[in-house]
Image (spheres, grey):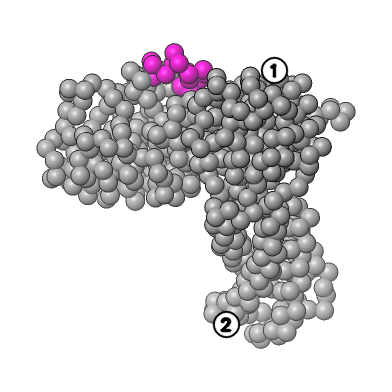
């Protein structure tokens, strides 16, 4: 998970700058007390990144030289191949510039929970700066005319090599964290929905490197005893009473990091607990009130050294709607070229293996709560709800056909919804459309549920690429949907589309 300090941690939006594309916004926090980290055991991965970056640049330079002067067939000015020695001496210098710039811009920090895609996109500014420095050095060297075409090709190949290298290192980091190497023992302080969601996400994604040592709440009874009124936490998570103070719990559980998942009105409590943690050398991360702040598109500002957090309305208005619609049409056309043959084959398989039509129509709610007909490949028996009425799908749902299990496992039954995108009833990216009967139920139970209807529903969404599907709570899905609505950008849409195929292959909660 990315580690940030100050108000920037709260306000980091879904896109833009080095804080771009934070993968799990629920776990974004305000770190207010740097301290020891058991994750220091993985510091050698920083050296692996430095060596990997340098190797990628040097190998890219060699490949670019070989291609330009021996393989490309492009005429060489003067007809003579430049001396290899001058280029061989320049490539290590370029690698040193790359490493220095990346180090100065903080690109070698170990960020928990950040995907390789986030890291590559977040490094774009550093790569651009390296290119500027390289061009300046090339212009300053008058003793040898270096080819700018070779320089450009070097950067293209270096970025590809950099992405592959970072993917390998991050995969190794996740593998080690999943097996307990370099993990931070974590205590979540709080009760209710906020604390439960934090615990759930920390346990769901062990690659973050946080081992939940327990939950601390205030209650009656002896210190260390679980309050009777506290419930709802996963089995096996110890619940500690704060009646005897926080310090004994920190010492007893050997805590490295504390997540303060308290309500927005408990400012004094947060400050007091943060001071206790700082005195014990424990890192503190404050989780904002997820129902009020995290989904409010917070923007960091500063006035006279005082950090401020401004809340802005949805960005999906005016010309942004036009941009999103144009993006949908262009991307849908490209995707449809690949998807059309698949839909034909799958439709034939559905029709031949079970009685009933190949395609299925169902009423869903669109933007503004207007109903529309969504198209899907039929994955269940014909008239599956004739006796049960509208019900949610289950992992062991017997209504699914043999082909339907395959379709739903890889979300292939959703492909016909590209036609809904063409009709303007859906977008490629957005909150998933809900059936009216369930929307009516959720609207009365989940705060701000209706706000997700302010935009077009999507074929995929921010909740879905975070593996929040049928098995997850509707409250948590709504949090992610609202986060998307209030932090929308074309870059955010593109990121979600790029993550979708990966999630389709490896998600665990589609059935």
Q: Which is nearer the eye, 406 or 377? A: 406
Is 377 on the left-hand or right-hand side of 60? left
Q: Which is nearer the eye, 395 or 106? A: 395
Judge whether residue 416 can be spotted in this image. Answer: no
- Quarter location, residue 277: top right
The residue that appears at 28% across and 49% down in the rendered structure is 342
Q: Please, which residue is most extreme toward the front here?
A: 222
Is 275 on the left-hand or right-hand side of 324? right
Q: Is residue 366 above or below residue 102?
A: above
The residue that appears at 69% across and 40% down in the rendered structure is 252
Q: Is residue 435 above or below residue 211?
A: above
- Residue 281, image x, y percentages: 78, 42
Magenta-highlighted stretch: main secondary structure? helix
Q: Secondary structure at mark 2?
A: helix
Q: Please, which residue is most extreme toward the right here?
A: 304
Chain part drawn in magenta: 439-454
- Residue 389, image x, y percentages: 23, 21
- Residue 89, image x, y percentages: 75, 79
Determine which residue is flagged by label 2. 70
Q: Nearer the viewer, mark 2 or mark 1?
A: 1
The residue that appears at 79% across and 39% down in the rendered structure is 280
The residue that appears at 57% across and 82% down in the rendered structure is 70
Q: Name the quadrant of the C terminus.
A: top left
Is 10 on the left-hand or right-hand side of 472? right
Mark 2 and mark 1: Cα distance apart in space:
68 Å
Q: Residues within 10 Å of mark 1 (few under 14, many from 20)?
A: few
Numbered mark located on residue 57 in the image: none
Sequence-first disc among 2 and 1: 2
Numbered mark located on residue 265 in the image: 1
């Amino acid at each position: 998970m990315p580690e940030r300090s100050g108000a920037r941690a709260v306000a980091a939006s879904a896109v833009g700058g080095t804080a771009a594309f934070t993968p799990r916004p629920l776990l974004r926090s305000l770190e207010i007390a740097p301290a020891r980290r058991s994750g220091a055991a993985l510091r050698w991965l920083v050296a692996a990144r430095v060596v990997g970056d340098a190797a990628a640049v040097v190998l890219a330079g060699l490949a670019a030289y070989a291609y330009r002067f021996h393989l490309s067939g492009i005429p060489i000015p003067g007809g003579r191949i430049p001396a290899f020695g001058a280029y061989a001496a320049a490539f290590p210098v370029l690698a040193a510039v790359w490493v220095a710039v990346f180090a100065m811009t903080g690109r070698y920090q170990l960020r928990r929970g950040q995907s390789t895609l986030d890291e590559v996109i977040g490094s774009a500014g550093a790569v651009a700066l390296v290119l500027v420095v390289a061009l300046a050095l090339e212009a300053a060297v008058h003793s040898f005319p270096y080819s700018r075409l070779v320089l450009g090709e070097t950067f293209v190949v270096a970025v590809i090599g950099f992405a592959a290298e970072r993917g390998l290192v991050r995969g190794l980091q996740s593998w080690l964290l999943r097996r307990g190497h370099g993990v931070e023992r974590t205590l979540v302080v709080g009760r209710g929905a906020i604390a439960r969601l934090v615990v759930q996400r920390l346990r769901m994604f062990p690659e973050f490197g946080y081992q939940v040592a327990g939950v601390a709440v205030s209650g009656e009874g002896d210190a260390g005893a679980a309050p009777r009124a506290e419930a709802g936490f996963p089995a096996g998570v110890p619940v500690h009473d704060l009646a005897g103070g926080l310090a004994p719990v920190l010492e007893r559980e050997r805590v490295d990091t504390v997540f303060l998942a308290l309500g927005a009105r408990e400012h004094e409590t947060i400050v007091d607990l943060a001071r206790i943690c700082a005195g014990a050398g424990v890192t503190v991360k404050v989780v904002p009130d997820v129902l009020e702040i995290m989904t409010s598109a917070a923007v960091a500002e500063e006035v006279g050294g005082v950090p401020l957090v401004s809340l802005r309305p949805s960005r999906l208005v005016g010309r942004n709607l036009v941009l999103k619609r144009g993006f949908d049409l262009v991307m849908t056309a490209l995707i449809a070229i690949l998807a059309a043959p698949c839909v034909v084959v799958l439709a034939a398989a559905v029709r031949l293996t079970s009685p009933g039509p190949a395609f299925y129509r169902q009423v869903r709610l669109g933007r503004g709560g207007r109903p529309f007909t969504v198209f899907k490949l039929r994955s269940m028996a014909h008239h599956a709800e004739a006796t049960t009425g509208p019900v949610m799908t289950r992992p062991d749902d017997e209504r699914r056909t043999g082909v339907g299990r395959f379709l739903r496992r890889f979300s292939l039954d959703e492909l016909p919804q590209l036609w809904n995108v063409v009709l303007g009833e859906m977008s490629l990216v957005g909150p998933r459309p809900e059936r009216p009967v369930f929307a009516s139920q959720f609207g009365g139970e989940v705060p701000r549920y209706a706000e997700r209807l302010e935009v077009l529903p999507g074929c995929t969404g921010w909740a879905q690429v975070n593996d929040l599907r049928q098995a997850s709570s509707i409250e948590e899905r709504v949090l992610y949907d609202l986060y998307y609505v209030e932090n929308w950008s074309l870059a955010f849409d593109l990121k979600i589309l790029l993550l979708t195929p990966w999630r389709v292959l490896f998600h665990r909660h589609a059935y």
